[in-house]
Image (cartoon, rainbow, N blue to C red):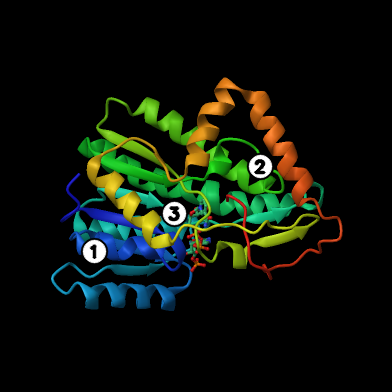
């Protein structure tokens, strides 16, 4: 896909992978609408990209909480009004919760599902009628390796990402002849704010991790959009998991039990915000 001139909505653009996607997309001439809750931060991201690439259309920043259906409608409605269409939706906004399943409340599950699943679903449902009518469009759903198999101490996060995976596959099959494509992205550990702001319910500790720079992850996503490749695995570990879970489930189960044992820490307290370095493959 030639990105120049394409109307692209990107959620979760105020930090991490989303923020890192803005520059390469603007550089290529995308007509970007960027969204997240922190409006000031978003405006700064838009300003930076516009200054850096003055010959490209400046991104339009829209403060939007994806859990608010009305806000999502006006995000998409505004983009359609301004630009006539939405060519690409990048569902990137996401949150995480970390810790023992037994300490994860039903409200914790709901909070994560609201953003990662229902928020992404709402965005898709808003853009799909336009895309289907036109007979073209691309949905890029940023999932996680944790969508492929339940990972210890990430139960709510896994539930949200695997739910989004399932719906994405349903939509992809149903729209196979419509001209609308769905691309799934599976990042591994990536340097971002997600580990700082996630809900920590306690009972386990995040392992020290090696993080991919968000810029590199973003470059690869943009390249995959351009090339029109299939689903994108950003780590060997993710690709291996996708193969092994079908071919050798006991191997995957053993690995998950090992991770659970290594990270178990009954004394680990709960906390609203992360207070240590390190992360698992969110
Ligand atoms: N980092 C990793 O290791 C990793 C691995 C696999 C997958 N991922 C996925 O990658 C995506 C991006 O995450 P990240 O790692 O870049 O984390 P991040 O730096 O925390 O970015 C998350 C983005 O989502 C936005 N967001 C959160 N709740 C929102 C809401 N209710 N409405 C609108 N926007 C909301 C945040 O902006 P505001 O706070 O301003 O709303 C922020 O811009 C997520 O879907 C995540 O699950 C990350």
Find numbered disc 2 in the image and state the secondary structure of the residue it sits on.
Answer: loop
In front of the other: 69 or 16: 16
Whichever of callouts 2 and 3 sits on the residue coming sooner in the sequence is 3
Is 98 positioned to the left or the right of 160 in the image?
right
Q: Residues within 10 Å of mark 2 (few under 14, many from 20)?
A: many
Q: Secondary structure at mark 1?
A: helix
> How far separated are the C-alphas under marks 2 and 3?
20 Å
In the picture, the disc for residue 92 is 3
Nearest the viewer among 252 and 83 is 252
Task: Tell whether 48 sits left or right of 38.
Answer: left
Question: Residue 98 is drawn in which quadrant?
Answer: bottom right
| Vertical arrangement, residue 112 with respect to residue 65, above or below | above
Q: Is residue 179 left or right of residue 198?
A: left
Q: Give me the residue at 22% from left, 70% from top.
A: 58
Foreground: disc 2 or disc 3: 2
Q: Which-is-in-front pick, marks 1 and 2?
A: 2
Q: Residue at x 79, y 44 (%)?
A: 261
Taking 138 as reference, is 277 left or right? right
| Badge 3 element | loop
Q: Position of residue 250 (x, y in %)?
A: 68, 25
Residue 156 drawn at (x, y percent):
66, 47
- Camera-side residue of 107 and 255: 255
Mark 1 neighbour class, 10 Å CA radius: few under 14, some 14 to 19, many 20 or more:
many
The numbered disc on residue 151 is 2
The residue pinned by badge 1 equals 26
Q: Please name whichever residue, 132 or 206, is drawn nearer the observer in this view of the structure.
A: 206
Please name the residue shown 27% across and 61% down the image: 24
Under 8 Å from ligand 1: the CB of mark 3? yes
Label whose residue precedes the other's in the sequence (1 or 2): 1
């Amino acid at each position: 896909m030639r990105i120049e001139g394409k109307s692209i909505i990107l959620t979760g653009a105020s930090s991490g992978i989303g923020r890192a996607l803005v520059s390469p997309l603007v550089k290529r001439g995308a007509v970007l609408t960027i969204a997240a809750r922190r409006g000031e931060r978003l405006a700064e991201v838009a300003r930076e990209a516009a200054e850096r690439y003055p010959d490209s259309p400046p991104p339009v920043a829209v403060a939007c909480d994806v859990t608010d259906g009305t806000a999502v409608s006006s995000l998409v409605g505004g983009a359609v009004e301004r630009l006539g269409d939405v060519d690409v939706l990048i569902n990137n906004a996401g949150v995480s919760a970390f810790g023992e399943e037994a300490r994860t409340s039903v409200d914790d599950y709901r909070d994560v599902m609201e953003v990662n699943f229902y928020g992404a679903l709402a965005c898709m449902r808003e853009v799909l009628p336009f895309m289907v009518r036109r007979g073209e469009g691309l949905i890029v759903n940023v999932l996680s390796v944790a969508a492929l198999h339940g990972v210890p101490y990430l139960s709510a996060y896994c539930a949200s990402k695997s739910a989004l995976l399932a719906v994405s596959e349903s939509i992809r099959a149903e729209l196979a002849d419509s001209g609308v494509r769905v691309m799934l992205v599976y990042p591994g550990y990536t340097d971002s704010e997600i580990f700082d702001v996630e809900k920590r319910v306690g009972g386990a500790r995040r392992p020290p991790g090696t993080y991919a720079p968000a810029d590199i992850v973003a470059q690869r996503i943009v390249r995959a959009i351009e090339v029109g490749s299939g689903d994108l695995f950003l780590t060997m570990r993710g690709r291996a998991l996708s193969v092994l879970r079908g071919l050798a489930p006991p191997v995957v189960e053993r690995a998950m039990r090992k991770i659970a044992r290594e990270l178990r820490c009954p004394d680990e307290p709960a906390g609203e915000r992360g207070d240590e370095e390190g992360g698992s493959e969110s």
